[in-house]
Image (spheres, rainbow, N blue to C red):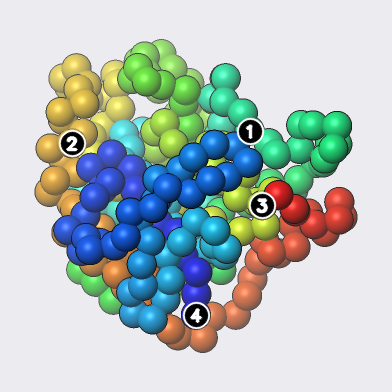
Amino acid sequence: MRKIAIIGGTGIDNPDTLKGFEKKIIETPFGKALCNIGTMSGNQMKSLGTEEIFATTAVGSLNPEMKAGHFVVCDNVLDFTKSRINTFYDSPERGVAHCDFTYPYCPTLREKVIKCLEKTDITFHKHGVYVCTEGPRFESAAEIKMFAMLGGDLVGMTNMPESILAREAEMCYTNCSIVTNMAAGISPTPLSHKEVCDAMALSIKNMEKLILSFIAYEEPTEAKCNCHHAMQEFGGFKL
C-alpha cells in the first residue's frame, strides 16, 4: 500500500472527491498539523509515514506557451524565498548536512504524474522551471522580467521549502502546477486573488481527476530516484 500525501494549493484545499476523510490533528516536533486522513483505491493518505508527496499549485505564467488552464509538471526550481525555515539540519543535535538538490522533484513520481496526464485530454507540459517567491504580495513587473531572463516558466509562492524539506526527510516529492494567469507585467490587467480563485474553479475538476488517477496508479514504475536514501551519508533522517 502506497502512503501518499496530497498538498493542495489555492483553490484545491478541499476538493469534493476527497470529502469523507477523517480530520485529525497530528502532533509533530514542530507543532500541530490538521490533516485529512483516509484510504482511496487501497492506498493511504497520511502525514505520518508518508512516502510520496504530490503537491498542486496555482501559478502565474512567464512562458507564453504555458497558458491559463494548462498543467505543468515542473522539473526544476528557482528559490527566491527570504524568511522561511528551509532545513531540518539547523540544530546542535543534527548538525549541518548538505543535501543534493540538483533535481528538486522526484523523477519517479514525475513519471507517474505524466503517465496519468497522458491518459486525459488535459493540455499539459512535461517540463517547467518554478520560481518561488516569498509573498504574500504578487511580484513586480521588473521581478517577473528578471525571473524570465533567468529561465523561469512559472511563478508561485509554494513548493519551497516543502520540496527541500521532503528531500531531507527522505520522501519523494513532485509538483503539478495549474496556470491561472499571465504574470505581472505580462498580464494586461492588474493581478488579483479573485482572478486566481476564479481560474482555479475552471480547472478544479481536471485536478481532481489527476489526483484520483495518481492515487490509483498501479502500473509498474522503475525507481529512478534516490529520495528514500537522500541523507544516507549523514546517517539517514530521523525525527
- Point out the tag, 4 or 2, that comes first from the N-terminus: 4
Residue position for label 2:
197
Residue position for label 1:
86
**Residue at the image position 42 percent from the left and 76 percent from the top:** 43
- The amino acid type of the residue labelled 4 equals Met
- Residue 209 percent across, percent down from the top left: 23, 66
- Residue 184 percent across, percent down from the top left: 30, 21
Residue position for label 3:
169
Calculate the distance from the C-alpha at mark 2 to the C-alpha at mark 1.
27 Å
Report the front residue among 195 and 150: 195
Question: Is there a contact, CB below 8 Å, between mark 1 and mark 3?
Answer: no
Asked if residue 79 lies left or right of residue 132, the reply is right
- SS class of the residue under badge 4? loop
- Point out the tag, 3 or 4, that comes first from the N-terminus: 4
- SS class of the residue under badge 3? loop
- Classify 10 Å Cα crowding around label 3: few (below 14), some (14-19), many (20 and above): many
Residue position for label 4:
1
**Residue at the image position 43 percent from the left and 71 percent from the top:** 44
- Point out the tag, 1 or 3, that comes first from the N-terminus: 1
Calculate the distance from the C-alpha at mark 3 to the C-alpha at mark 4.
20 Å
Q: Judge depth for marks 2 and 3 and give the one in front.
A: 3
Q: Judge depth for marks 4 and 2 and give the one in front.
A: 4
Question: Is there a contact, CB below 8 Å, between mark 4 and mark 2?
Answer: no
- Point out the tag, 2 or 3, that comes first from the N-terminus: 3
Report the front residue among 230 and 62: 230
